[in-house]
Amino acid sequence: MPTEDELPKPLKALARRQALELDNKNYDYSTRDLLNALESYLGKPRNRKSAKQKNPWYLSLPFLVLSLTTFFPAGLFFLIFSNYPFKTKFITGIFGLFFFLIWVGLITDDDSNTNNPNNNITTKIGQSSNNTEETSQIDGSVNTPKVKAGFDCETAYTKVEKAICSYSQTREIDLQLNETYTQYKNQLPPIVSNKGRKQQSTWIKSRNQYIENNCLNKSDIANCITAYYQKRISTIKELINTSFTDVLVIDPPSNIRKIPNGEKICQVTNQQYISIYNTPQIDQKQGLWYWTEYCGRGNWGVIHESQIKM
């Protein structure tokens, strides 16, 4: 999975999405998971009229034919030719017209509900509009925040991302975390940096779950999110301060190699202190190798444990 920085702007938000795998073995189970995930965000769909569902009796063709050929002519005949008093005819005509209009109204309403699929999402659109208006009024526009977050708020999609973008306090702490993590990632050897990305992705999943379960239902959402972020920032800063150690090269000349026992990059020619990454790369035959940037910024290589004194 590429990082957000490696994706073009329209696809950057994909780096913060959680994928659901669909395969042939567990297709039914996987599709249920996918539908549950969609319904958790979009809401459950209304029951739409099935194409095979029969029309109600008052919309059936036999009742329509019967009405036009029997009830309607009989009613007109009664009103025109019967010997009942005018008052009786008038009241009967009013009632007949009233029920006729109700019948026409039922037909019109049913047809409009059936033929207009937008009716099925009216409620959700209304909820989304209200939510957007609410988040926009919390702390300025979500789409154009004065304080930027660590990601593009214009692509905010989930409830958690929208909550982060709704407050200048949370946007600022998210940007601070992004800068702190970038600093940490940039000082790591490439092979370790890839593992760091996976750890950060795992933390983002935990963050989403924590905020949704513990912060979104509170009145002080911003403080709740900020407190959770501060713990992560403290952890990364501690890693920055403790990931590297200065060690003495004790038996020069000592080779710095591209990989354990691989191509030589450069050589330490005299006794001196160099900075190494604390966690070694283990080679079953050759022992421990430590990553170092001694050969130049970004030019990572390894030095064998036998050449250094911790």
Image (spheres, rainbow, N blue to C red):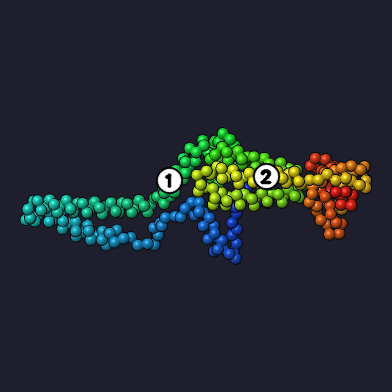
Residue 23 % position (x, y): 60, 62
Dot 1: few (<14), some (14–19), or many (≥20) neighbours within 10 Å?
few
Residue 42 % position (x, y): 48, 51
Dot 2: few (<14), some (14–19), or many (≥20) neighbours within 10 Å?
few
Which residue is label 2 attached to? 234
Residue 124 % position (x, y): 44, 49
Q: Which residue is the extreme one toward the bottom?
A: 25
Q: Secondary structure at mark 2?
A: helix
Tell me the quarter of the picture where residue 78 sits.
Answer: bottom left
Q: Secondary structure at mark 1?
A: helix
Which residue is label 1 attached to? 126
Residue name at image x 59 percent, y 43 percent: 226
In the shown orientation, is residue 64 left or right of residue 45? left
Residue name at image x 81 percent, y 56 percent: 282
Tell me the quarter of the picture where residue 53 sits.
Answer: bottom left
Q: Which residue is the extreme one toward the top?
A: 146
Question: Looking at numbered disc 1 in the image, what kind of residue is underneath it?
Answer: Gly
Question: Looking at numbered disc 2 in the image, what kind of residue is underneath it?
Answer: Ser
**Is residue 258 in view from this perspective?**
no
Residue name at image x 26 percent, y 54 percent: 103
- Marks counted in the figure total 2
Dot 1 or dot 2: first in sequence order is 1
Residue name at image x 50 percent, y 48 percent: 217
